[in-house]
Image (tube, grey):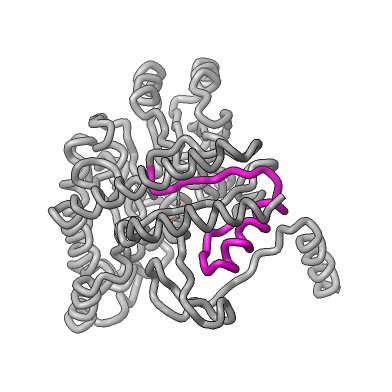
Amino acid sequence: MLIEHLNRRLLELDAAALRRRLRVAESPCEPLQAFEGEHGGEPLLAFCSNDYLGLAHHPGLATVLAEGARLWGTGSGASHLVSGHLRPHAQVEELLARWFEPHIPHARALLMCSGYMANLALMTALGDGSATLFCDKLNHASLIDGARLAEGEVKRYAHGRLDVLESQLAACTTPIKLIVTDAVFSMDGDIADLPALLKLAEKFDAWIVLDDAHGLGVLGLHGHGALEHFELRSERFICMGTLGKAAGVSGAFVAAHPAVIEWLVQKARSYIYTTAMPPALAHVLVASLKLIGGNEGRVRRARLLGLIEQLRTGLRTLVSVQPGWKLGESATAIQPLIVGDNETALNLSAALRRQGLYVPAMRPPTVPPGTARLRITLSAAHTPAQVQRLLQALAQAMGETP
Ligand SMILES: *Cc1c(COP(=O)(O)O)cnc(C)c1O
């Protein structure tokens, strides 16, 4: 019964061109990556990872990870509150607290196993019955799921519509108000207007839960993310960042006022009831974060910016001759090419695949209906010649796609 039910539902997904497929990568995360059963085993030129600085397969970091495993073993053995909170975890937290001190007075940081779990932690521990959560409609799925689990009331505002948010805040009577937003939106690459959000937060005594998964490492002179980019400072910011994207490892953190962090330690179930990340990962995270904040990080960010400019210039020319297609308003490593319907997005992605390029098509429910797209992501590990190859392949694929 269950199996028949599921098979029927799966066929519905096929019919709507919404079936997703797992593919096994046969080589590490790099611009040239081989996948099982694809392109005759030859590597594809991939524009799909969130490894924005090209650190996921950095030889120096791999050495530090091995050293971490020698020093600290492979497992933490327990949750943080029992005995799994080891020195390397504390070192990551101390380093991140220093990063965020200029932006969040007295900042403390808390290391978590993943961004998904960090967002569940924030939404459930802070969004209790005395709180209202105000969520941008394009927030990441983990924030949406967290809001579903939260006891507090949830209000959603259309993407970036701070006028709507303002009237919702004005009408709100709960003592705690939490504005919840991605800093860089994951399917569009646009950056939230944080200065305007902070003004609203101050006006209505609200707090801002900021998901900087795609800004950390990429934005700001030292790669400290969206708050550094805008040079903002307020205790009202509760910042979540992920460590599996630009940082090239795994995990996530929350940086916030010490009282917020202490409350998470006491109450956040997705923090308390899970095994702490392997200490070797924390050990290499210290090195990765230092690299991001230092000269090598600066060089990689500059290279990434150059590639973003090159790609956007080329894409602008392409969309100008293809009515109905749109380039997103993005200054970040996420560059959407919005084509509209699911079929077109899939065909375009398949046409690129035939040319040896991997650019994933994003369809509903990941993006709103009617805005299916190619989600092109760039990495500092790409070369200008590879970006050029993408632009040429797109031009050819456009000719083949109605
Ligand atoms: C990737 C992502 C997350 C989840 O982070 P993980 O560490 O991969 O679980 C949360 N928010 C946003 C905006 C993301 O892009």
- State the quadrant of the N terminus: bottom right
**Nearer the observer, 215 or 384:** 384
Q: Residue at x 62, y 51 (%)?
A: 398
Where is residue 231 shown, x and y percent of the image?
Answer: 23, 31
Q: Is 153 left or right of 277, judged from the image as shown?
A: right
Tell whether position 345 is magenta: yes
Q: Residue at x 36, y 59 (%)?
A: 385
Residue 334 drawn above or below residue 284: above
Q: How many marks?
A: 0
Quadrant where ligand 1 appears: bottom left
Residue 32 drawn above or below residue 377: below
**Magenta-colored span:** 332-360
Q: Residue at x 21, y 42 (%)?
A: 100
Q: Is 42 left or right of 84, judged from the image as shown?
A: right
Residue 98 drawn above or below residue 68: above
Where is residue 6 shown, x and y percent of the image?
Answer: 79, 69
Q: Is 87 left or right of 177, judged from the image as shown?
A: left
Residue 212 seen in this snapshot: no
Tell whether position 313 is magenta: no
Q: Is 152 left or right of 98, judged from the image as shown?
A: right
Residue 265 seen in this snapshot: yes
**Nearer the observer, 131 or 311:** 311
Q: Residue furthest left?
A: 295
Where is residue 187 shown, x and y percent of the image?
Answer: 52, 46
Residue 13, quarter of picture: bottom right
Residue 191, quarter of picture: top left
